Amino acid sequence: MLFAKTDDGVDLCYETTGSGTPIIFVHEFAGHKESWEPQVRHFARHYQVITYNARGYPPSSVPPDVSSYSQNRAAADILAVLDHLKIKKAHVVGLSMGGFATLHFGLLYPERALSLCVAGCGYGAELEIRDQFRKEAEASADMLLKEGMKAFVDKYAYGPTRLSFERADPNGFAEFKEQFYGHSALGSANTQLGVQRERPSLYTLTERLQKLTVPTLILNGDEDWPCLRPGIMLKETIPSAALSIMPNCGHTLNIEDPVNFNRIVGDFINQASSGRWPMRDPRAMVKSITGMKT
């Protein structure tokens, strides 16, 4: 196994496959580096593909204190892996929790990103449901610590935005659950409390997002309702952002529909790499609907 050490002494287990321009994939809360296998097999034909387990996800270290987990730390862990591999710049692709980490990586370290693919990003972002999301994160952590991974997974995996995955690919969904069972209850609970519960709302970051010029793709499934309105907000706010919606697809985009996911992300990376990724025309960023004065 290969490990990169962070500046606070956490070991992050990573894998690298293929050669060429680097792409680093950042997994969701219910995932791990193996969740990106359909992407590794596809993109490693032409790129250096890096996957890693976040802190709290064995065989990466599981810090026992919640204080070791945060949104900024999640972004810094991406940097730690790149620094360990002596990679100056990479395309960064993240899903859900990993999508938030990818977006914050772009805000904190824009000079290290060739592009940002922010997929399934938006859970708990809307200010009117923020308290509810924080309470659900606390309930998740409590269940993890009291009842363990299996009981938690048997409930969490059937959340409303994952049902389309079970419908589309029952065998894939069963494999997803089986791998999820193997996570650390402590690491998952600390992630819920330190990262999920405490991350800032996207709607409080608009001034910073307006200054982001790294080529950015916002990618959501149309069955992933907690991400739809935040996705539109990100498209409206980030001047270098495009928005893509995958039809009849829920939260676990990359394994629910890997063919379409790989096609969309591949086309985006190709265009971003060409140096022709467009910035939004300032003339389009006005309050008028048709452009007519009233």
Image (cartoon, rainbow, N blue to C red):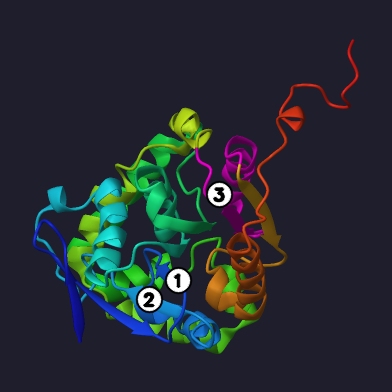
- Determine contact: label 2, label 1, CB under 8 Å: yes
Residue 174 in the image, given as x and y percentages of width and height: 47, 85
- Determine contact: label 3, label 1, CB under 8 Å: no
**Residue range highlighted in magenta:** 212-239
Q: Which residue is mark 2?
A: 50
Q: Label 2: state its secondary structure.
A: strand
Binning the other alpha carbons within 10 Å of mark 1 as few (below 14), some (14 to 19) or many (20 upward) gives: many
Q: Which residue is mark 1?
A: 23
- Label of residue 226 in the image: 3
Amino acid on which the number 1 mark rests in the picture = Ile
Mark nearer the N terminus (3 vs 1):
1
Give me the residue at 30% from left, 66% from top.
82
Q: Label 3: state its secondary structure.
A: helix
Left or right: residue 148 versus residue 232 is: left
Report the front residue among 163 and 75: 75
Mark nearer the N terminus (2 vs 1):
1
**Does 179 sit above or below residue 239?**
below
Amino acid on which the number 3 mark rests in the picture = Pro
Distance from Cα at disc 2 to Cα at disc 1: 6 Å
Amino acid on which the number 2 mark rests in the picture = Ile
